[in-house]
Image (cartoon, rainbow, N blue to C red):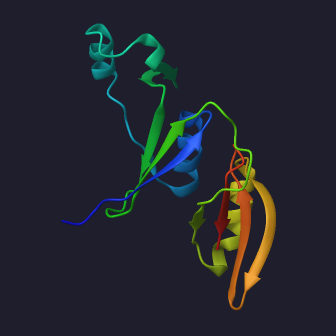
Amino acid sequence: MASELQVTIDATDPHVQADWWAEALGWQVEPQDEALIRRMVAAGHATEADTTTHRGRLVWAVGAAITSPDPGRPRVLFQRVPEAKTVKNRVHLDVHVGAERREAEVARLLGMGATELWRESQGPYVWATLADREGNEFCVA
């Protein structure tokens, strides 16, 4: 049986990060079952401290995930951690849009609050390195 891959990214505000990346990639934020969350709290399997309200809905505080509309792509989970990012990522996302769309995509992402860090090229490959709202580096190629 083949393994499934999930990419997990640490975040201080996982729900805001999930919203931002879902918009950036054209993906969907995975819905959370508010009724299930309420039942888990009522039954004592979770506490109110395990939950938060985001966009008017009760959600698990610890994280939020996004999924691609195209099957077979990995799920991306944003997981709450107490500390902010302090050093370069050891893993990062590459957003491939093609040379003809790269500048427009960089401009769109900058308009959404990303920060441009630097430009690079290697042989025929050219990319822009940006940072998301929490400083996580990613490339647009």
Quarter holding the N terminus is bottom left
- The relative height of residue 100 versus residue 7 in the rendered view (above or below) is below
- The relative height of residue 131 versus residue 78 in the rendered view (above or below) is below
- At 46% from the left and 37% from the top, the residue drawn is 64
Which residue is situated farthest in the left direction here? 1
Judge by depth and name the residue closer to the eye, 62 or 16. 62
- At 59% from the left and 67% from the top, the residue drawn is 94
The picture quadrant where one finds residue 58 is top left
From the top left corner, tell me how far across and down residue 133 is, in percent.
Answer: 70, 44
32 sits to left or right of 22: left
Quarter holding the C terminus is bottom right
Q: Is residue 56 visible?
A: no
- The relative height of residue 141 versus residue 66 in the rendered view (above or below) is below
- At 48% from the left and 25% from the top, the residue drawn is 61
Q: Is residue 25 visible?
A: yes
From the top left corner, tell me how far across and down residue 92 is, in percent.
Answer: 60, 61
From the top left corner, tell me how far across and down residue 77 is, in percent.
Answer: 46, 45
Judge by depth and name the residue closer to the eye, 10 or 69. 10
Judge by depth and name the residue closer to the eye, 112 or 30. 30
- At 52% from the left and 25% from the top, the residue drawn is 54
From the top left corner, tell me how far across and down residue 102 is, in percent.
Answer: 68, 72
Which residue is situated farthest in the bottom direction here? 123
13 sits to left or right of 60: right
